[in-house]
Image (tube, coloured by chain):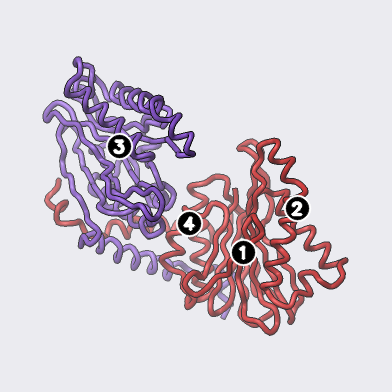
Chain colours: A red, B purple
Amino acid sequence: MTYCIGINLDEGLLFASDSRTNAGVDDVRRFGKMRTFEVPGERLIVTLSAGNLSLTQNTLNLLEHRARHGDGTGLLNASSMFEVATMVGDAMREIRKRDEPYLRDSGIDASGTFIVGGQIQGEAPRLFLVYSEGNFIESNPDTPYFQSGEIKFGKPILDRVVTPKTSLLEAAKCALVSFDSTMRSNLSVGPPIELLLYHRDALQVGIRERLEDDDPYLNQVRGHWNDSLRNALQTLPMPEWLSGEN
Amino acid sequence: MTYCIGINLDEGLLFASDSRTNAGVDDVRRFGKMRTFEVPGERLIVTLSAGNLSLTQNTLNLLEHRARHGDGTGLLNASSMFEVATMVGDAMREIRKRDEPYLRDSGIDASGTFIVGGQIQGEAPRLFLVYSEGNFIESNPDTPYFQSGEIKFGKPILDRVVTPKTSLLEAAKCALVSFDSTMRSNLSVGPPIELLLYHRDALQVGIRERLEDDDPYLNQVRGHWNDSLRNALQTLPMPEWLSGEN
C-alpha cells in the first residue's frame, strides 16, 4: 500500500508520501514514491505515485528517458502543467497497454495513480490527480488537496483543517498528523516519509525532508496528537441524557 | 453505506449505528441498523447490521420469527452469546442461499455483516462480529471493539482511545466523535445515530438514545472537535528543519 498527499495552497504546494510497498505481508520493501523534475528558476514538477509498482516505475522511467533523450517534447519542455499531466497519463497508458494483459492473466491489479503538481514559469502552481486510465482532474479552491493510496484514515484531519489560506507550515504539520493516523491503522503504510515544500514562484524545491521511523519529530507528533485527542475527548461535555448516568 | 460500532468494556457494552441506506446516490433512505432482543433481568441481545439491506432484514425477520413462533431453540432461549452468534450466522447463510443466485445474476453484492453483543444471565457480556459467510470472531481485551460498514474514517480515534478500562461514558463520546469524522467524509453515512449503553450485569438496556441531524449535542461534538483539532495542530511545535522557514 501507499499513502500520498498533494496540497495546493495560496503560499505554494505541499507534497508528502510514504516509502513502503508490499506484495503480500511477507514481501515488504522500501521504495520512495516522490520524484522531482527540476530546472531551477524555470520549473519544478513533483510526482507522487501509488498503485502497481512496476506500472508507476516504468511510467516514470519512460518520462525520464524522454525528458533526457527525447525530441524536445518531454516533461522538461512542456509549456504548462496541463501538458505535464497529459504526458504522465499518456505514459501510463503506454505501459498499461504493454503489461496489463499479462498481469490480468495472473489476477494482478495493474492500476496506478499519480498526483502531479508543480509550477512552470508563466503559470500559477497547479496540482493534478492522474487516474489509472490516464485521464485526470485538477484541484480547485473547494478541493485544494488530493490523496492517493490508503486515503481514508488520514482524511478527516485534512478535511477539518486544509483550505487554500492554510500556511505551508501548518499544512506540513497537518500532513504529518494525517500520516501518523494512517500508519497507526495500516501497517502497509510506513516511513521514511518524504515531505516537500514548494513556495509559490520559487521555481525550485523549498525544503525536502525525509523522516525515518525513529525520527524525533515524528515521535513528537505521535505523542502530542495522542495527548491532544484524549484531552479533547475529556473536555467534550456530556450530553444531558448521559449526565445522570453513573 | 452504513457505520456501526460495538465496544466491549469492563463496565459494559456500547453500541452505535447510523440510519442511512442507499442504492445509488438517488435512492437514499432511512433504516435503523440496531435491533434488540430483551428479556429484562435475564438477557439483552443487540445486533447492528451492515451490508445488503434485504439480506440483513430478512436474517433478522427469520430470527425474530423463530424467537416468537419457534420450538424453543431461538435467540430468546439460547444459553450463551456464542450460541446467539451461531444462530445469526446460520440465519444469514439460509437467506443468502435462497437469494444470492438471483442477486449475483444482476451483479448485486449480497454480502452483510452483523455485530452481535449482549449478556445472558450466567455469562459475562460478550461481543461478536459475524461475517457475511456466517462464521464469526469474538472481541478480546486487545481488540475490544468491532466496526462494520464505512470503518476507516472513524477508526483512528477509536484506536487512540478505547481500551477495556475506558468508561462507558467516555466510550459513548468517543463513538460519537468517530461518527462525526465518518459523516463528514462519507455522505452515505447519516443520522439519526442510535446509541445504546449497557451496564454489565444489568440484563436490560441502560440508555438508548436516537440523535437526529439537528441534535444539539451532535452539533456540540462537531464544533468542539473541530476547534480541538485545529488547536492541537497549532500547539504542535515546528520541527527544527522547518523553524527557519518563512
Tell me which numbered mark, 2 or 1, is placed earlier along the sequence. Answer: 2
* Mark closer to the chain start, 4 or 1: 1
Q: Secondary structure at mark 2?
A: helix
Residue A149 drawn above or below residue A217? above
Q: Callout 4 environment at 10 Å: few (<14), some (14 to 19), or many (20+)?
A: many
Q: Reply above or below: B14 against A3.
A: above
Marks 3 and 4 share the same chain:
no
Question: What residue is shown with label 2?
Answer: A95
Residue for badge 4: A154
Q: What is the three-letter code of the residue carrying label 2?
A: Ile
Between disc 3 and disc 1, the foreground one is 1
Q: Measure the alpha-carbon separation of dots 2 and 1.
A: 17 Å
| Three-letter code for the amino acid on which mark 4 is drawn | Gly
Residue located 66% across and 59% down the image: A134
Q: Tell me the chain of label 2.
A: A
In this rendered view, identify the residue nearer to me: A113 or A96: A96
Residue in view at x 38 percent, y 39 percent = B52
Please provide percent x and percent y for residue B101: 45, 29
Contact, CB < 8 Å: mark 2 with mark 4? Answer: no
Pointers 2 and 1 in contact (C-beta within 8 Å)? no
What's the distance in space between the residues labelled 3 and 4, CA to CA?
Answer: 25 Å
